[in-house]
Image (tube, rainbow, N blue to C red):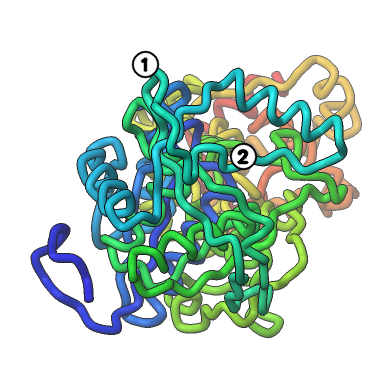
Amino acid sequence: MYNSRFTGQVFLKMIRTRFAPSPTGYLHIGGARTALFSWAYARRHGGQFILRIEDTDLERSTTASTQAILDGMAWLGLDYDEGPFYQMKRLDRYREVAEQLLKAGQAYFCYASKEELETLREGQRARGEKPRYDGRWRDSKATPPAGVKPVIRFKTPHAGEITFNDLVKGSITVANGELDDLVLMRADGVPTYNFGVVVDDLDMNITHVIRGDDHVNNTPRQINILRALGATIPEYAHVPMILGSDGERLSKRHGAVSVMQYRDEGYLPEALVNYLARLGWSHGDEEQFSREQLVGWFDLAHISRSPARFNPEKLDWLNQQYLKTVDDDRLAELVRPLLLAREADPSHGGPDLKAVVGLLKSRASQIPEIADAAVTFYRTLHPSPELKAQHLTAAVLPALKTLAQRLAIVEWSVTEISALLKAVAAEHGLKMGQVGVPLRVAVCGTTQTPSLDATLHLLGREAVMARLQTEIA
């Protein structure tokens, strides 16, 4: 039953997932994929998706990082049903549960100093043992040292084992003897990660914990605390990490940057969502699918047990596919600020930007490429001396001058412009490419454009004539 402290409602047997990032950096690819899988699983089953900000790392947590996480999720369209909840606003609740465990004899005060613990670990390492707390205050009757603020430790069972069925990795068993008495509450009254997570998952009635497999070792500890509290144990699904294309741990050089950097570099959110979904999960041979299809298909059974590999080229390909079909009105608004930054203002004359992006989008992998190609429609780009020398030669100038004369009177349609280009090329004994490339250089300042007849048509007769005459005079 769901704790009413959050919504005032009670839900029975409803799937509830959560994404619980620490605001110590931006929302990166790995975190975004975890959020996506948790979101998709909840949506697939008609459940609820909760956002929780685990901000108890006081030295590293920042407001800027929190906002970056919220911005990244909003851009990706990962809407949450409840939250964001902040752990630092729930300190009283963690103290309450810690007191409950103390009274039940399942936790205790530990007065060991940092120096004591470091000496303990050094000795263990010297003997080739695993460094761990030795339980010296577990059942101690000693008088607490004066002036020392204790931590609260959990009494991990000495006997038995923890077995849970990981929905990705399968059955996992860990002997309690391998676990020491972890700290629940620090001396400053702030919970440790493992304790905060347990209390939050309990209070928020989380049914499925989907997270990175770097948390597998934390799960037995958390299950022990949940059992001590008499709580229902969630289902756990630990997702393998993402590696770079070279098989090394994903880093900035592989593309492990802020999700918002992908926005700034010209990727569409639906393309990144599609790509993230395919990082370690699949549905048959489907490569491109909508958000609705993802929700309809997503399951945990098809998450790979092996690490996924991040492939920037595959992401570029997917983004290109989405750009081909994106609504031109939407794309025009994404391109507009990039044009302004390139000193090309669509509001000061020139063709309709919607039509321009519609012509250009099939050739681009990122939105800035469209902006680069669109500049010529709103600002004259003169060819470099090298381009002029290479393409505006004596052999082709007569044909370009003929074109300049006839473009002034031809019916201004794509069909008629196309017919004129072919006729003039034939008349001068040239192939179409021998006329088309020099014409592009003269009018657009470059050797490459989309279909030349469509480009000239969009530019308009006046602009084409003015540019052509300037360069062939």
Residue 323 in the figure: left or right of residue 178:
left
Near-viewer residue (253 or 343): 253
Left or right of 123, for residue 431: right
- Counting residues from the start of the chain, the first of labels 1 and 2 encountered is 2
What amino acid type is highlighted by mark number 2?
Tyr
Say which element carries label 2: loop
Tell me which residue sits at (35%, 26%) in the image. Answer: 188
Residue lying at the far left in this picture: please name it. 8
Q: Residue at x 54, y 80 (%)?
A: 299
**Residue 146, which numbered label?**
1
Q: CA distance from mark 1 to mark 2?
A: 22 Å
Q: Where is residue 274 shown, x and y percent of the image?
A: 56, 64
- Provide residue 264's location: percent of width, then percent of height: 51, 35
State whether residue 194 is above or below residue 162: above
Name the residue beneath numbered marker 2.
Answer: 133
Q: Position of residue 71 (x, y in %)?
A: 37, 41
Q: Which mark is residue 286?
A: none
Q: Tell me the quadrant of the picture where the N terminus can be found.
A: bottom left
Quadrant holding the C terminus = top right
Front residue of 246 and 12: 12
For this view, does 260 lie left or right of residue 345? right
